[in-house]
Image: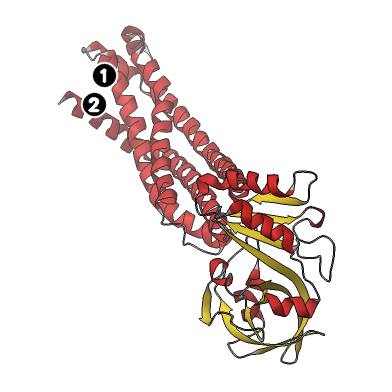
Amino acid sequence: MQKSLFFDFAIRNVRLHWFRSLLAVIGIIIGVVAIVSMGILGNSLVLAISDSLSTVGDSVIITPHAGGMGGMGIGGSDDLLTERMIEQIRRAVAPDVTIPIYSGSARMTIGTEDTVGVVYGLDPDDIPILLEVEEGALLKGESGAMAGAKFAEDNELKVGSRITLKDKGSLRVVGILKERGMGFDINPDYGIVVDGNWYQKAYNQQDYDMAIVKVKDLSRIEQTKDAIEKQLNRRETEVDVIDTKAILETILTAFGQISTFTTAIGGISLIVAGVSILNIMMMSVTERIKEIGVLRSIGTQRKEVRSIFLYEALVLGVIGSVIGGVLSIFGGYAISILMLQTTEYLFVPSSLVYVFYGIAFGIGTSLLSGLYPAWKASNLNPIEALRHE
């Protein structure tokens, strides 16, 4: 009963000073919306980057040491992976699959339009391991090609369209690949995939630009890397071996830190709102010194006086935080559209949890802001409080 009475006192004071209370609530709302929206943006950014990196950490990429990431050593360059190297890699990583790849670029004519695109040469048996078909069929012969999703969209390619590569012949599109996104190995979205034998003849190139090892057991990825290093780099460094799992973890860690930073920026506005509540509560204590004196003189205990002011801070915090939590959904929606052009990561649990974090932080900040005013009110001398004018 007593607790209800003191809570009623707090509600009464909030109503009596409604405009001042409204300003405090608006401060909390802004703070919660800011911290939740920034949290949702950061988490959505991490998820978007994670999804766009099609290589999910199950690959080891091998490139010639002098050739960097490969792909530009076209036409018989020494900076390539020889058949001997590929066989050594296969022996080192067995039973995992090794996929040798040719890669280059070419001027192309599609209809009456000229363009430039990347060209990947693969063994048709290896294609299903790396790529998925959106439309049409997988590559089966040397006269066909598969077009990347973005390349097909930009050049209005369909199954059956013809692509003429300058000085290299004409190919018929037999399939459109499913969009793969940015990867650490190959990026066929903006190019075409051809038969490895056709690539050899067209580019007069026998050796490979790179190789990809698909590791079935991720716990063995370091062991696989070491096996390749020992096999090929015993005397001198012939190849560079890249672990996509490590790259992915590094990138996601970096974006996770960015997410934390953006959330912290949003938290600053909530701290400002907390200072506003502290100021309002201190003003409330000053204005109600005589009332506090009356309460203390009729036997109200110090902890009960403290509870009145803490209830008041709690009411302001709950109202502002709950409204802010609801509005932050719309804030997260708007910022996702603006920054990422998608809202597919808004309603996932790892994003929505920021709403509860924001509400809890808002209520906690309000209570902390009310602690000192409540303590000061409860420690006023009753006699001096009654004499206060």
Give above or below for 224 relative to 191: above
Mark number displayed over residue 6? 2
SS under mark 1? helix
Q: What residue type is labelled 2?
A: Phe
User: Residue 139 location in percent, x, y?
Assistant: 59, 80
| Mark 2 Cα shell of 10 Å, populated few (<14), some (14-19), many (≥20) | some
Q: Which amino acid does label 1 sit on?
A: Glu
Residue at x 38% of width, y 17% of height: 375
Residue at x 69% of width, y 73% of height: 121
* Tag 1 residue: 304
Q: In this view, does 164 lie to the left or right of 268?
A: right
Q: Who comes first in sequence, dot 2 or dot 1? A: 2
Give above or below for 349 relative to 54: above
Give above or below for 128 relative to 69: below
Residue at x 73% of width, y 77% of height: 199
Q: In which quarter of the image is residue 53?
A: bottom right
Residue 150 seen in the figure: yes
User: Residue 59 location in percent, x, y?
Assistant: 59, 55
Assign the N terminus to one quadrant of the image: top left
Asked if the residues shown at circle 2 and circle 1 are in contact, with their CB atoms under 8 angstroms apart, the answer is yes
User: Residue 263 location in percent, x, y?
Assistant: 53, 42
